[in-house]
Image (spheres, rainbow, N blue to C red):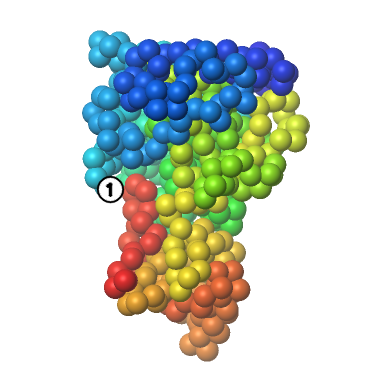
Amino acid sequence: MFWDETHETLPRPDLERLQLQRLQETVRRVFARVPFYQRKFNDLGLTPEAIRSLADLRRLPFTTNADLRANYPAGLLAVPYDQTLRLHTSSGTTGKPKALFFSRQDVNNAAELCARAFIATGVRAGDVFQNMMTYGMFTGALVTHYGAEKVGCLVIPAGPGNSERQVMLMRDFGSTVIHLTPSYALYLATFLEKHGVEPRRDLQLRKAFVGAEPYTEETRRKIEEGLGLDVYNSYGLSEMNGPGVAFECEQKQGMHLWEDHFLVEILDPETDEPVPEGQSGELVLTTLCREAMPLLRYRTRDVTALITAPCACGRTHRRLHRITGRADDMLILRGVNIYPQQIERVLMAQPGIGRNYLIELTGLDEMTVKVELAEAGFGGQVEQLIALQKKLAEKLRAEILCKPTVQLVPPGDLPVSEGKAKRVVDRRQL
């Protein structure tokens, strides 16, 4: 089943013609209305007329996170203020926030893309959608809220945390679909265990959409086992419209990126050259339908690869592999490049290990991985725990080429975040 079958199944030549038309319209818009891009084009000696094919995308300038912050609050706005309908911002934890404006059409497009995604995963009118993301300046909750309403779901704007209340809502209103962060999904599974709630018996949950944090396939399996449902990967970022930029279908073989709304590049972050097909690199996106704040070649810093083979679902839009990390998240330890997801993959695949962990970097270059034991594993013989500790340390050394200190801690000992989880604490004296 499709939400917008015409666009979701466009033959590749037709899709690329539509992309070129929309790219040219976007370039004309930013050149005429955004001084930042006018300066960039002048520096490069470019005019909109130079963009005659999709290959000419590479002639356009990049846009970065720093550019959005430098042009705060409204330096990248492409419409008059009275044509904006909504404002979202980033948290601003690394300096000035990023201000992201939406026109009425942008708000509608964002909801439409989420509706496409939900239908592709098997959500239908009549489902009960419990939205457990943070409402407010973050795009994740509101955009999916409107998308689920378009499909015809009953939407419960529960927000994050307060697990007792979340379970009450699930029981009282028969929630079938939930939307939450992977870290909170793991915590919720533990909460249900502790309170004797068997999801398959006591709840009606069928599907979970998890996002806002990178996570591994091993974590997906833990969530599915703990909550008794199907978990779908999704990808989005506020700069592009929020969630719904790319989403798995029921095949779960990569996330369809809606290419009638976004042009995709996978580049080597060091050389800015395209990587060979199927290889990982930095995801760079250009908006094709944004009115209020169109962005050219936005460097997401997210690491992924393209899947170009046809999907059995019939959608013709290419797919992204799961996001393996952010270039900004990479740790350098004793000269070795490490992504936190590599550590998570080892931990979540190990029997007897719980669902929460923390990576601490201290001293000159020391790593300690604290991980909770599963309830069933807590209270085991000291010899067994020591053996498990050594086993994990060796597996981690094989994965990340450095041997960290592993500390096994009791269930519930590590802090739980109701928003995005903070998995790495860096206290090194460098």
Name the element at disc 1: loop
Q: Position of residue 78 (x, y in %)?
A: 34, 17
| Residue tagged 1 | 94
- Residue positioned 38% across, 53% down in the render: 421
**Outermost residue toward the bottom in this view:** 383
Where residue 40 sits, quadrant-wise, is top left
Instruction: Name the side, left or right, on which 250 lies relative to 231.
Output: right
Q: Residue at x 27, y 48 (%)?
A: 94
Q: Residue 57 occupies which quadrant of the picture?
A: top right
Three-letter code for the amino acid on which mark 1 is drawn = Thr
Does residue 232 appear left or right of residue 11 in this picture? left
Vertical placement of residue 402 versus 26, above or below:
below
Task: Please indicate whether residue 16 sits to the left or right of residue 354 in the image.
Answer: right
Locate the C terminus and report the quarter of the image it occupies: bottom left
- Identify the residue at image location x=37%, y=69%: 360
Looking at the picture, does residue 426 appear above or below residue 271? Answer: below
> Relative to 201, is 72 above or below?
above
Image position, residue 279 (x, y; %): 66, 47
Residue 420 visible here: yes
Q: How many numbered markers are drawn? A: 1
Of 346 and 42, the residue lying toward us: 42
Circle 1 residues within 10 Å: few <14, some 14–19, many ≥20? few
- Residue at 44%, 65% in the rendered image: 332
Q: Position of residue 35 (x, y in %)?
A: 31, 21
Report whether 217 appears left or right of 423: right
